[in-house]
């Protein structure tokens, strides 16, 4: 026997945990010792691509997963992690009862991490999450992505997620819009929450398969919550005094949004996507969030053409593809890095700056005189201009380089001798 195979099981399990899933599985053919190590490994990652296209392949996959889980369960061994990834073309009916059994065995064996990636067609073939999971007191991380439905029976069931710290739900179908809030309210230790594009039946009786986006969310009394990522919910209320990081992505810019952060006074990082932002609401947030260090605005539109950004603790600011802006006034004496991405040329003024401040600009343009003049105007609209550290150009149409074009660039280089310019040509 080689020296490695004779190491304690705990160390061998640690070695397997550091390997990619496929490589870890291959160790089972090395020797009897490694096979025993593999079968007792408490972290299961089961992935099958297109196995539903062949019946025999499906049977072998089910048999393999069942064998490993049953062996751990029957021997009273822990199942710390169970990750199940199935192909998007599958029909869940043949395997749904087996998935129920797998989740039950994992729950009874002290599972800490459960991840289901069941990509499928919405409102047609969804796997219904079994109620046995609600007994998983040891669960610390739950990730559900696509192809999964949360049944309304959860509303009348006692949820025992006393240890859950991370919850991620992406493209999940809900039988009742109240399920999410009920689910989260039974997670007293939750720290990280991700909710992306969750759907709900329009008709509670499910006589119709029509669905719509989850419209509202209220998170209350979550003392441990630190990180929230929400997408596709137009009305959000968050009562989490220790929240540090929030990413909010609205579904449609044309639809009014409601985002209440009154109690999130310790917020440090805020990212907003696809919002039509009222200037009054925007300015109020800076007074309610005095410790904000990072602000990122992506694909947003503002009510007025001028915005003011006061941030005594702000260190990073990003403005990316935001429309209807002609003037941006930034009063952030501790700002270290600022990023601009877009094709417009707003006046960007820094009222108070630190000696370390750098502005990195990514400008979209095509080769014609209008955009060359516009680029020059954009650069001249940065005040003070010494903060401009880099300028990346994204040219979206092929063109031939003319002498006039080269002359313009030489003048630009002469005007900003310390500027590092990157030209990207994208036909």
Image (cartoon, helix red, strand yellow):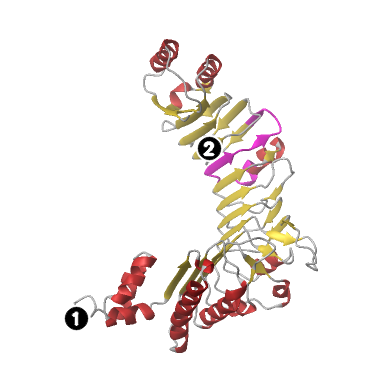
Secondary element under disc 1, as helix, strand or loop, is: loop
Whether residue 299 is in magenta: the answer is yes
Label 2 – label 1 distance at C-alpha:
58 Å
Give above or below for 160 relative to 283. Answer: below
| Residue of label 2 | 318
> Residue 62 location, x and y as percent?
50, 77
Which residue is at the far left?
A: 2
Residue positioned 56% across, 79% down in the render: 98
Residue 156, by quadrant, is bottom right
Residue 345, by quadrant, is top right
| Residue of label 1 | 1
Which residue is at the far bottom?
A: 75
Q: Earlier in the sequence, mark 2 or mark 1?
A: 1
Q: Is residue 159 left or right of residue 386?
A: right
Callout 2 crowding tier (Cα within 10 Å): few <14, some 14–19, many ≥20: some
Residue positioned 45% across, 87% down in the render: 76
Give above or below for 411 relative to 394. Answer: above
Of the pair 63 and 259, the residue shown nearer to us: 63
Whether residue 170 is in magenta: the answer is no
> Residue 372 location, x and y as percent?
51, 17
Q: Is residue 287 left or right of residue 109?
A: right
Task: Determine contact: label 2, label 1, CB under 8 Å.
Answer: no
- Circle 2 or circle 1, nearest the eye: 1
* Res. 290 visible in picture: no
Residue positioned 70% across, 67% down in the render: 179
Q: Which residues are magenta?
A: 286-307
> Residue 217 location, x and y as percent?
70, 58
Secondary element under disc 2, as helix, strand or loop, is: strand
Give above or below for 313 relative to 247. Answer: above
Of the pair 417 and 110, the residue shown nearer to us: 110
* Res. 412 visible in picture: yes
């Amino acid at each position: 026997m080689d020296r490695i195979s004779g190491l304690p099981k705990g160390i061998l399990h640690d070695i397997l945990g550091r390997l990619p899933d496929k490589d870890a599985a291959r160790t089972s053919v090395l020797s009897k010792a490694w096979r025993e190590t593999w079968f007792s490994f408490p972290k299961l990652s089961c992935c099958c691509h297109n196995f539903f296209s062949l019946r025999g392949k499906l049977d072998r996959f089910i048999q393999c997963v069942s064998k490993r889980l049953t062996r751990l369960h029957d021997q009273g061994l822990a199942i710390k992690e169970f990750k199940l990834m199935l192909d998007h073309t599958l029909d869940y009916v043949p395997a749904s009862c087996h998935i129920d059994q797998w989740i039950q065995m994992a729950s009874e064996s002290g599972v800490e991490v459960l991840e289901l990636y069941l990509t499928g067609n919405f409102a047609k073939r969804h796997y219904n999450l079994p109620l046995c999971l609600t007994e998983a007191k040891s669960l610390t991380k739950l990730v559900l992505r696509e192809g999964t439905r949360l049944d309304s029976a959860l509303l009348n069931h006692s949820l025992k997620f006393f240890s859950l710290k991370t919850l991620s739900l992406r493209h999940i179908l809900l039988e009742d819009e109240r399920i999410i809030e009920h689910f989260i309210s039974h997670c007293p230790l939750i720290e990280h929450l991700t909710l992306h594009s969750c759907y709900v039946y329009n008709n509670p009786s499910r006589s119709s398969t029509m669905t719509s986006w989850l419209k509202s969310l209220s998170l209350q009394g979550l003392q441990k919550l630190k990180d929230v990522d929400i997408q596709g919910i137009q009305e959000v209320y968050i009562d989490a005094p220790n929240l540090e990081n929030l990413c909010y992505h609205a579904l449609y810019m044309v639809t009014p949004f409601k985002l209440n952060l009154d109690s999130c006074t310790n917020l440090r990082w805020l990212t907003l996507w696809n919002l039509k932002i009222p200037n009054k609401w925007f300015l109020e947030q800076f007074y309610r969030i005095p410790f904000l260090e990072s602000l990122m605005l992506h694909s947003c539109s503002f009510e007025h053409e001028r915005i003011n950004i006061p941030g005594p603790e702000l260190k990073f600011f990003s403005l990316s593809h935001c429309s209807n802006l002609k003037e941006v006034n930034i009063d952030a004496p501790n700002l270290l890095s600022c990023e601009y991405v877009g094709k417009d040329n707003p006046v960007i003024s820094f009222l108070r700056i630190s000696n370390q401040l750098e502005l990195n600009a990514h400008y979209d343009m095509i080769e014609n005189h209008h955009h060359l003049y516009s680029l020059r105007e954009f650069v001249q609209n940065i005040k003070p201009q010494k903060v401009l550290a880099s300028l990346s150009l994204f040219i979206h149409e092929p063109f031939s380089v003319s002498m006039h074009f080269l002359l313009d660039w030489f003048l630009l280089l002469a005007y900003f001798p310390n500027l590092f310019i990157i030209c990207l040509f994208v036909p």
